[in-house]
Image (cartoon, helix red, strand yellow):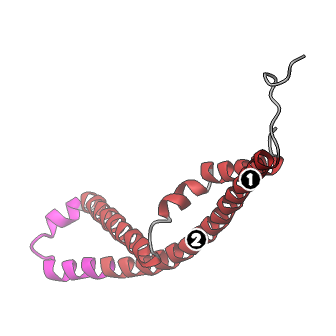
Amino acid sequence: MLNEEKVKIMTKLAIYEKNEGKDAIKNNKYYKSDYVSIMLINTIITITFAYILGLVIVAIYKMDYFLENLVKINLMNLGMKVLAIYLIILIIYIVIAYIIYSMKYLKIMELNKKYSEDLKELYLVYKKEEKMKSEAKAGGFEINDTDVDI
């Protein structure tokens, strides 16, 4: 005999684990500060890579101009402008990423709390079934087909 309540809970847990729970359960082991820090480091690396790639593309596009005016260009001034733009972009993205990943962490913890409550409910259903089986055995005897003579 299948317990309908147990099947419903297990189905709910399986759906969660397959969909949004895949990342949420994996990230449950982090504290908020650790999770956000890891994501910020990832953001910094990604933005740095994208910025360098963008600089290379612009340098290739403007190669004729750079080669013609190599002596006239103030390389120190150009380097300071490139660095300033990089720092401004980096700070903007870090602030945005901090806000987004902080909110995402809170959502993950909320989902994991619901998941944990469902696991506790499933555990209680199992305990209830065990208790009923042990009371049935203690209060009487079970009839098997081999015990009955016909």
Residue drawn at x 36%, y 82% as measured from the top left: 88
- Can you give x and y, in whole percent of width and height, for residue 28 in the image? 50, 65
Q: Main secondary structure of the magenta part?
A: helix
User: Do we see residue 74 in this rendering?
Assistant: no
91 vs 41, nearest the viewer: 41
78 vs 32, nearest the viewer: 32
Left or right of 24, for residue 118: right
Amino acid type indicated by mark 2: Met
Which residue occupies the extreme right position in the image? 150
Residue to which mark 2 is pinned = 109
Left or right of 1, for residue 94: left
Left or right of 99, for residue 3: right
Residue to which mark 1 is pinned = 9
Q: Which residues are magenta?
A: 63-85
User: Do we see residue 35 in this rendering?
Assistant: yes
Residue 61, magenta (yes or no):
no
Q: Residues within 10 Å of mark 1 (few under 14, many from 20)?
A: some
